[in-house]
Amino acid sequence: MSITEVTSHFWVARPPFFSSTLLLACDEGEGRVTTTLTLFDVDGVQVNEVEVEFPAGEVGIVELEPFSAALKMQGGVAHGHLAVSSPVGTRHLCRQSIGGSTAMMQDPIMIKGRESSFIPLIIGAQREHQVVLVNASPEAAQVLVRLFYANRAPEWTVNIPANASKLISLEQELLNTSEDTSWEKGALQAYMRVAVRQQATVSCHIIERIPGESPEQDAFRCLASW
């Protein structure tokens, strides 16, 4: 990355379950601002790279569906890692539409080697969570995911290829591997800690689903790491 550029790393996904839109804003300078979008699939393979332009002082809006047709499916969702590079002074946001809900994701906080990040959440039989991990590094990442609830703290190791993204069901793929089932009996306050073993750089957020009486009434929200 050039010192005259700023780069953001977002998780993006395709319809029918998700819809991702990129928003760009630059208040500095005149003329047009050039932004490079580089898209990687769940294996970290680059599947697209495009340049977009928008006038300085205005908000550029990029619907990502036309550029993401080559993304692979994982966990029933076609998704990937989007790297966005713009001149310094440009702000990047990603709007995620999930069912009937919309979340505005700011430039994600990146977790580097020897650092950790916490995400509060509530676990229980009436909630489902998808853990989203994005490796923004050109080398593979080994991520430690630990969940603290009640007097328990199970931990899992997740391997993510370079530039790849990973979507994991907290309940089906992680919690179901432990012998404890107390979390199924009610709503428990919990905290997820995410740490990176190597010098890779990773971002994390959680998609929470609260089932409604029908799929159309399901409620979604995104829980960001800090």
Image (tube, helix red, strand yellow):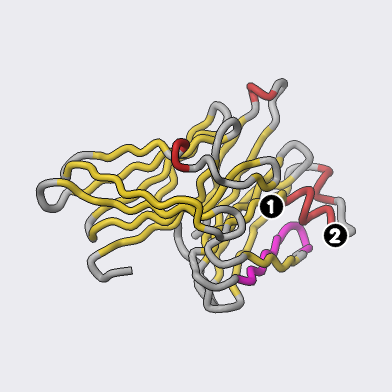
Left-right relation of 80 to 191: left
Mark seen at residue 201: none
For the magenta stretch, what is the residue range?
Answer: 141-152
- Quarter of the figure with the N terminus: bottom left
Percent from the top left, x then y, of residue 60?
27, 40
Mark seen at residue 168: 1
Residue for point 63% across, 68% down: 143
The chief SS type of the magenta part is strand
Type of residue at label 1? Ile
Q: Quadrant of residue 85?
A: bottom left
Q: Residue furthest right?
A: 179
Residue on which the image places disc 2: 178
User: Which SS class for mark 1?
Assistant: strand
Residue for point 69% across, 41% down: 76
Is residue 146 covered in magenta? yes
Question: Which of 204/35 is in front?
Answer: 35
User: Which SS class for mark 2?
Assistant: loop
